[in-house]
Image (cartoon, rainbow, N blue to C red):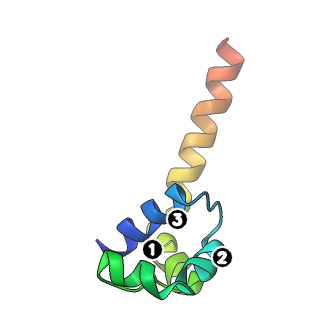
Amino acid sequence: MTFVGSFLILHAAGGEWVEDLERLRQDPRLAEMIGHGLPSPRAALEFLQAFHQEEKIEEVQTHRLMSRREA
């Protein structure tokens, strides 16, 4: 839940990139409030990359292309 919660906090704070976590990590009160520190941008990116499946991306892109051609 640490990563997912951190992404929700990042989004709520207006962050758009994992690099924006660094600014939030500098606020010790935020970590105290949520009960844990925020992950580093590198750790957050590694977490997200664990879900990366190139074949699924290609499948979605092919499906989108076919849908556009049919429209």
Q: Where is residue 69 in the image (x, y as percent from the top left)?
A: 71, 19
Residue identifier under label 3? 10
Q: In this view, does 67 lie to the left or right of 48?
A: right
Towards the viewer: 46 or 40: 40
Q: Are marks 1 and 3 in contact (CB under 8 Å)?
A: no
Task: Tell me which amino acid carries mark 3.
Answer: Leu
* Element class at badge 1: loop
Mark 3, other Cα within 10 Å: few <14 / some 14–19 / many ≥20: many
Could you tell me which quadrant the C terminus lies in?
top right
Q: Are marks 1 and 2 in contact (CB under 8 Å)?
A: no
**What is the C-alpha distance between the residues marked 2 and 3?**
10 Å
Give the residue at the far front of this rendering.
29
Q: Disc 2 or 3, which lies upstream in sequence?
A: 3
Task: Tell me which amino acid carries mark 1.
Answer: Ala
Tag shown at residue 19 = 2
Q: Position of residue 49 (x, y in %)?
A: 52, 72
Q: Disc 1 or 3, which lies upstream in sequence?
A: 3
